[in-house]
Image: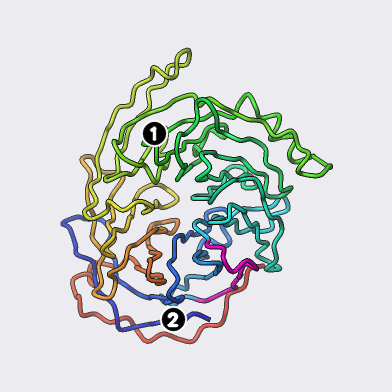
Amino acid sequence: MPKITLGNESLVGSLIPSNKKSYKLTNRIQEGKTPLYSVAFNFIDARFFTCFVSAGGNGINLYNCLEDGSISLLSAFTDEDKEESFNTVSWACGVKGNLFVVAGGEKGIIRVIDVNNEKIHKSLVGHGDLVNEIRTQPLKPQLVLSASKDESVRLWNVETGICILIFAGSGGHRNEVISVDFHPSDMHRFVSCGMDTTIKIWSMKEFWTYVDESFTWKDDPSKFPTKFVQFPIFTASVHTDFVDCNRWLGDCILSKSDEILLWEPQIKENSPEEGTSDVLLRYPIPNCDHWFIKFSCDLFLNYLSIGNQEGKIYVWDLKSCPPVLITVLAHDKSKSVIRQTAMSTDGNTILAASEDGTIWRWDAINKEQADSVEAQRPPLKEKGKAKLK
């Protein structure tokens, strides 16, 4: 079990004048010396909103965030391939409600792990190079998208192990794809971005019969008539360098390069490539020009958090215009690159996955606590392991 440090190493974030949230460091876990590239809360099943998963090296760990600030290790998975290094992890769900953790990395093979029995449910083989990100369809959590260095995005059914659609070709990305995200309300659309500096919006609407067929397919998954989709419905170049993270905010898009931009794609239905991109807001992040640093939002898209290469975390209010920087979270022992953050459903907890193998936990505090930097958290009571049922 990873070493869990509790209690005294807490520091209130550098507060920017705001009536919004303030945070305090409540915990940190040193998983080892292997860099951590991904951390994700469970937004799929409301019973387990406090659970999160981390990925780094050939290991996947599942935890539960307890109310007193402590963290309980639920289970650990180690891939049989010692040379595997997971870059990304996401939660998914079977048709009967069984929880999956879906992870991908250097080998290009995606592992679908059944949380209940801690065994591999499926191994998804198809990508020709490493996998940079996996995202789950929130309205149909048996479906996941994977973004790869092989310049493609693939749509998978994790229940059946079928590769349904491959997005690549004439109109696709011209370098590795680093990030993908499903539209929150339009099940047929998603956005992708990558090292070629472009952001592309794709539609699956006319290919949805393939998606339906993936749930009833009885033959070998390798014999499924996977469809190639070569042309997106929109391509934008709002950044001048690599784009390594993108997320929908309603019908607008948040995308990150050397800064985070909020922009609105103006798509022409008859001539999508002639559409325009209107930048609405800018969210600067100092010392964040390394690639593969990814931001996160809470479930209700009120807040955004992102780390930088100095180990600091910037928290933005997404409902404010002009943008309001709520706080900068810092600790004298957090000096390594924060590769990814994860925000809880309400934004009250922020997790950070660090390149030095540490997971940092920050929790929202009330005004009285924020006014007293020296305030100490009450002694922790011993807690047993929480179980996923």
Say if the magenta span includes residue 266.
Answer: no
Which residue corresponds to the image point at 51% horizontal and 76% vertical from the top-left?
72
Q: Are marks 1 and 2 in contact (CB under 8 Å)?
A: no
How far from the left and from the top, in percent, is residue 282?
Answer: 24, 40
In depth, the one of 184 and 111 nearer the eye is 111
Q: Pointer 1: residues within 10 angstroms few (<14), some, or many (20+)?
A: many
In depth, the one of 97 and 90 nearer the eye is 90
How far from the left and from the top, in percent, is residue 263?
Answer: 32, 33
* Marks 1/2: CA–CA distance: 41 Å
Q: Quick one: SS at disc 2?
A: strand
Identity, as a three-letter code, of the amino acid under mark 2: Ile
Numbered mark located on residue 4 in the image: 2
Identity, as a three-letter code, of the amino acid under mark 1: Thr
Give the residues in magenta. Answer: 72-85
How far from the left and from the top, in percent, is residue 378?
Answer: 34, 84
Q: Can the viewer see residue 349 in this picture? A: no
Is 310 placed above or below 171 here?
below
